[in-house]
Image (cartoon, rainbow, N blue to C red):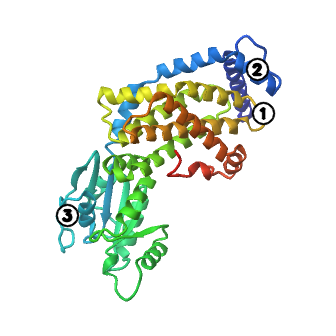
């Protein structure tokens, strides 16, 4: 039965591929060499570009807009044992005193919510039952995109901390571990040394030593770590805090690029184009939102559309090159994946440049930027790199670089 099912599946894939190839290479026989493939693709570019343009028109911009707007409702939860400094951290991040601070354990008894731009920070009540979360705390975790688990350096790691961490870990949410009150350490122990000891005791990687009171390591480590933990958190944090926008943009671009990379490796030509278009359009909208654009406004959507349309000519050629690469045996799928990833990465970088300039870049300059960035990406990331890393189950190292001078 299994062999019959596999045979049927292979036959279906072969039939689908044959039909797709008929639509791609109109009026020619199937190319038998790479040279024939190139000649065939060139002969049929007008028809294929028209197909790409039709797909772009068919993209549901309203759905993409709604998805990005929904993403602006993501939250970060601060959770920990009573009196670990959750409210102090909460207030320091917000810059206002909105949650009661007290030396008494468990002063915060209900969820305290406040808008942080579109981002909502949730300061949970203290957890005073070993290994068990209060109902209000669990409500906060269910709302979270990222959890910040706070511990008290002045008391050291406690049994309750270990039990609570196990409960949090089972929620399968991105979690940042922070050791607070390191400014109170005595006896010569350094914050980094104690953070390492705590990480070992919890069996965790990367505990960040901080002081919510003085602000130590909040801007340098905690906020960047939250951005890196979740593209959803990156969007809302970057939108509210301009100093972190470029870093947040790189996190969002990296995620979109990896989605495109995976889609591009799909061996059947043209199957992946709707996925790529959707990913790239959402990428542009997310970057627009990141830089403070009001996506519900007509002008904001107009600028985003114009940005995509400006690059559309280059996009059509990239799509066609990617689809042609799929037909090349022995590695063509990796070439296609690299082209797809490079295209998305380049779109993201140009969008960042566009919005950072205050939307003052001319269409001709945008097209040139797109071409330059794409060529640079292809020069720095080879197919061999992609193949080797993919065989090891990893994403290419250089594909994940977040170079701050990428547009220079």
Res. 108 mark: 3
Task: Indicate whether 317 appears above or below 284.
Answer: above
Question: Circles 3 and 2: CB distance less than 8 Å?
Answer: no
How many other residues sit within 10 Å of disc 2, few (<14), some (14-19) or many (≥20)? few
Q: Secondary structure at mark 2?
A: helix
Of tags 1 and 2, which is closer to the observer? 2
> Is residue 37 visible from the viewing direction of this image?
yes
- At 76% from the left and 13% from the top, the residue drawn is 28
Q: Which residue is mark 1?
A: 329
Task: Give how far apart the Cα atoms at labels 3 and 1 are.
Answer: 63 Å
Compared across the picture, whether 334 is left or right of 347 comes to right
- Which of the pair 299/208 is nearer the observer? 299
Q: Secondary structure at mark 1?
A: loop
Q: Secondary structure at mark 3?
A: loop
- Which callout, 3 or 2, points at the residue further toward the start of the chain? 2
Q: Quadrant of residue 178?
A: bottom left
Task: Give how far apart the Cα atoms at labels 3 and 2 are.
Answer: 70 Å
Compared across the picture, whether 33 is left or right of 186 comes to right
- At 38% from the left and 77% from the top, the residue drawn is 157
Task: Give how far apart the Cα atoms at labels 1 and 2 are.
Answer: 17 Å
Of tags 3 and 1, which is closer to the observer? 1
Extreme residue in the right direction:
32
How many other residues sit within 10 Å of disc 3, few (<14), some (14-19) or many (≥20)? many
- Which callout, 1 or 2, points at the residue further toward the start of the chain? 2
Q: Which residue is mark 2?
A: 39
- Which callout, 3 or 1, points at the residue further toward the start of the chain? 3
């Amino acid at each position: 039965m299994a062999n019959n099912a596999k045979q049927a599946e292979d036959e279906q894939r072969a039939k689908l591929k044959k039909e797709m190839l008929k639509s791609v290479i109109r009026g020619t026989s199937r190319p038998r060499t790479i040279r024939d493939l190139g000649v065939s693709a060139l002969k049929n570019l007008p028809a294929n570009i028209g197909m790409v343009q039709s797909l772009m028109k068919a993209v549901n911009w309203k759905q993409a807009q709604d998805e990005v707007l929904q993403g602006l409702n993501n939250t970060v939860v601060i959770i920990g044992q009573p009196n670990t400094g959750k409210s102090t951290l909460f207030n320091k991040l917000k810059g206002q005193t909105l949650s009661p601070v007290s030396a008494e354990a468990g002063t915060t008894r209900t969820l305290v919510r406040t808008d942080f731009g579109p981002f909502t920070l949730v300061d949970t009540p203290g957890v005073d039952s070993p290994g068990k979360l209060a109902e209000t705390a669990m409500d906060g975790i269910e709302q979270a995109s990222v959890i910040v688990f706070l511990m008290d350096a002045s008391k050291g790691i406690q049994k309750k901390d270990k039990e609570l961490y196990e409960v949090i870990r089972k929620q399968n949410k991105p979690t940042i571990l922070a050791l607070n009150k390191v400014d109170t350490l005595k006896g010569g122990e350094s914050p980094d040394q104690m953070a390492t000891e705590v990480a070992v005791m919890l069996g965790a990687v990367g505990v960040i030593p901080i002081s919510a009171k003085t602000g130590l390591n909040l801007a340098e480590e905690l906020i960047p770590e939250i951005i890196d933990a979740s593209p959803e958190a990156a969007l809302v944090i970057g939108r509210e805090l301009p100093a972190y926008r470029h870093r947040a943009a790189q996190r969002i671009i990296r995620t979109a690029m990896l989605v495109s990379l995976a889609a591009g490796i799909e061996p059947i030509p043209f199957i992946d184009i709707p996925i790529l278009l959707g990913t790239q359009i959402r990428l542009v909208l997310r970057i627009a939102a990141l830089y403070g654009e009001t996506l519900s406004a007509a002008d904001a959507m107009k600028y985003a559309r114009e940005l995509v349309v400006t690059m559309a000519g280059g996009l059509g050629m990239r799509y066609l090159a990617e689809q042609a690469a799929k037909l090349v045996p022995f590695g063509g799928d990796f070439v296609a994946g690299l082209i797809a990833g490079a295209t998305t990465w380049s779109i993201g970088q140009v969008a960042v440049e566009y919005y950072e300039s205050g939307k003052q870049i001319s269409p001709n300059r945008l097209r040139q930027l797109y071409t330059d960035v794409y060529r640079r990406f292809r020069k720095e990331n080879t197919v061999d790199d992609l193949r080797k890393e993919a065989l090891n189950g990893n994403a290419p190292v250089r594909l994940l670089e977040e170079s701050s001078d990428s547009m220079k």
